[in-house]
Image: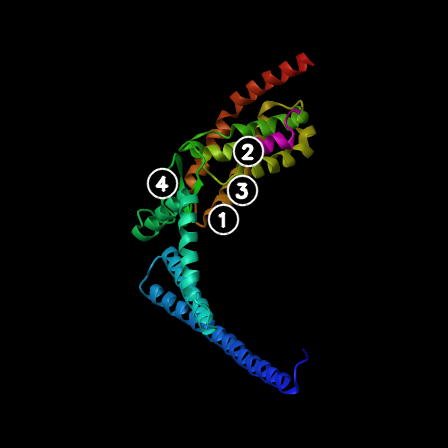
Amino acid sequence: MNPTPATASSLMETIQTKGIEIGIKLIGAVLAYMIGRWLITFAVGLVKRALTARSVDATVQRYLSNILHVLLNVALIVALLGYFGIQTTTFAALFAAAGVAIGMAWSGLLANFAGGVFLVVLRPIKVGDFVTAGGVTGTVKEIGLFATVISIQPVHIPGYAALTPAFTLMAVYHWPIYRPDLLPPSVLFLVGVTQDLLAGVPPGVTALVLLLARAAVLPHRRHFVDRLFPFVWTGFTMLTIGAMLFLWTLHCLLDGVLVDFRGTVFRAVLTISMFPIASFLLGRTQRTFMGAG
């Protein structure tokens, strides 16, 4: 059955009317969404400024702002759905059912979430505290709702750097002169990093000093071979003074403060004083290697 001209005209009028109505609603929805997003950003900014004015912790500020941002966005979406005549009660039921399923599947994760909420709200610890938790000891770097980041501190020996002679510096002076092949840079780097971990300083500082000392000794090794011990000891004294001054300067730059120079002087004097004994032992070791070769 072919449609009559009147029926076709009525159909076109209906399509035009509905199209205009839907178009107006779409334009209104887009405008409402843009205005709503701007209002949400403005409201979250007001809350952040209010929390900052009350000196609220930055972690709490971030989570309260994020929660408010999510809730307001959900409210905006629900309002837009209602504007188009979509029943939101069905979505609410689906969200409730999904929440129950997620709660059963992610019970452990939600337990961590609840613990994170207590940490953020009750504040038993804060960023920068040195704590022991879950068998881990370190400094709190970040407190989150699902996880807390703890920077593990190396187990160091108190006073190791200040009260121990620089035995590695003695080896760095001796072996590049007589047997450079026995102390390659890779081994020296590992030794320096290990010493840094024992001393509780940033890893790599001592390794850098030792590598520079080796580089300074190696080109001049021919001047110290088969020379009297006082001459060799004088060379080590000059190397120790330079290395200790450089190490002290590095610590001052890394710490941002003027480190007490007396500890550096004490360690330098102790290292220079112990060098004759260390040189004797290193010489015996050298002769053992040469005899084995």
Mark 2 and mark 4: span between their CA atoms? 28 Å
Q: Position of residue 21 (x, y in %)?
A: 53, 81
Mark 1 and mark 3: span between their CA atoms? 11 Å
* Label 3 crowd bin: few (<14), some (14–19), many (20+), radius 10 Å: few
Q: Secondary structure at mark 3?
A: helix
Disc sitting over residue 246 in the figure: 3
Looking at the rendering, the stretch of residues picked out in magenta corresponds to 182-193
Marks 2 and 3 close (CB-CB < 8 Å): no
Disc 1 marks a residue whose amino acid type is: Leu
On the image, numbered disc 1 is attached to which residue? 253
The foreground one among 44 and 255 is: 44
The foreground one among 86 and 64 is: 86
Disc 4 marks a residue whose amino acid type is: Val
Mark 3 and mark 4 lie on one chain; the one further toward the N terminus is 4
On the image, numbered disc 4 is attached to which residue? 131
Quadrant of image for the C terminus? top right
* Label 1 crowd bin: few (<14), some (14–19), many (20+), radius 10 Å: few
Q: Position of residue 86 (x, y in %)?
A: 46, 69
Is 146 above or below relative to 229?
Answer: below
Disc 2 marks a residue whose amino acid type is: Gly
